[in-house]
Amino acid sequence: MMTTTPNRESGCTNLPIDAGGKEANRTAQMILDWARDRRLLRLRSDRRTGSPEKEHLARWSEILEGRGIAEENQVFAVMDRARQQADQADPWRNWSFLTLQVQIAGERMTVSEPVAPKEFSTSRISADEDPASDWAKFKAKIRTEVGEIPFTNWFEHTRQVDRCGPAITIAVADETTRCYLEEEYRELIENAITGTGIETVRFVAEGGV
């Protein structure tokens, strides 16, 4: 088992100028073009309805670049898939809700020669892992099931930080990773821990460890 712990229209959005240079700006512009082409308006942090703000454009650009998704048709396809998933999940009003769906859609898209995701705090998580921990053993089994690219993207830089009886706590890089592991790999993880004495896997974002 796994556990988890009035508007005005404004269509103007400034592109991020410090979110990874020219390629980030190019990808962000394509995402903005996509939103405008689809005539999508959602709530922003200023409580106004409009196009996505630069922080969302920067985050989504980072996700797509990490997956090697750089061409306009690929970007539009991922964003369309993310929107479709969001529409199916629940009526969504805020742009922030789309972030996880972009992550999932990017993961599922097959691209040639995918690029490894950018690393930040994840390298420290990997360095601190105890190779004798329960989670390290589970990860070895999971690796054979998911393949190298998904394993590198989602599991490699996680680490066990606590065990209390049949429950273990796993540190992950951020909330997006936590949500993705819990939603997309729940069954795989439950299968990996079956018969090991571990009954609960709890994921926490690094800042919550």
Image: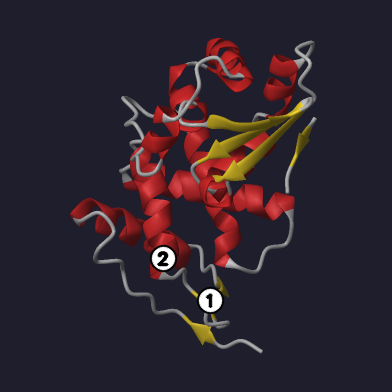
Q: Residue at point 50% right, 22% down?
A: 130
Q: Residue at point 72% right, 50% down?
A: 88
Percent coordinates x, y for residue 13 in the rendering: 38, 75
Percent coordinates x, y for residue 196 in the rendering: 75, 12
Pick whichever, 14 or 77, lies toward us: 14
Q: Amino acid at mark 2?
A: Glu
* Secondary structure beneath label 1: loop
Q: Is residue 152 left or right of residue 72?
A: right
Q: Is residue 80 left or right of residue 70?
A: right
Q: Which mark is residue 55?
A: 2
Tell me if label 1 and label 2 are in contact, CB under 8 Å.
yes
Estimate how packed mark 1 is, as few (under 14), some (14 to 19) or many (20 or more) residues with alpha carbons within 10 Å.
few
Q: Is residue 174 left or right of residue 120?
A: right
Q: Residue at point 32% right, 61% down?
A: 29
Residue 37 visible (yes or no)? no
Q: Residue at point 19% right, 56% down?
A: 22
Q: Amino acid at mark 1?
A: Ser
Name which quarter of the figure residue 183 lies in: top right
Percent coordinates x, y for residue 15 in the rendering: 31, 68
Pick whichever, 68 or 72, lies toward us: 68
Name which quarter of the figure residue 164 lies in: top right
N-terminal label among 1 and 2: 1
Residue 156 visible (yes or no)? yes
Q: Which mark is residue 56?
A: none
* Secondary structure beneath label 2: helix
Percent coordinates x, y for residue 21 in the rendering: 20, 56
The alpha-carbon separation of the residues under discs 1 and 2 comes to 10 Å
Pick whichever, 96 or 49, lies toward us: 96
In this picture, is 4 found above or below 39? above
Q: Which mark is residue 45?
A: 1
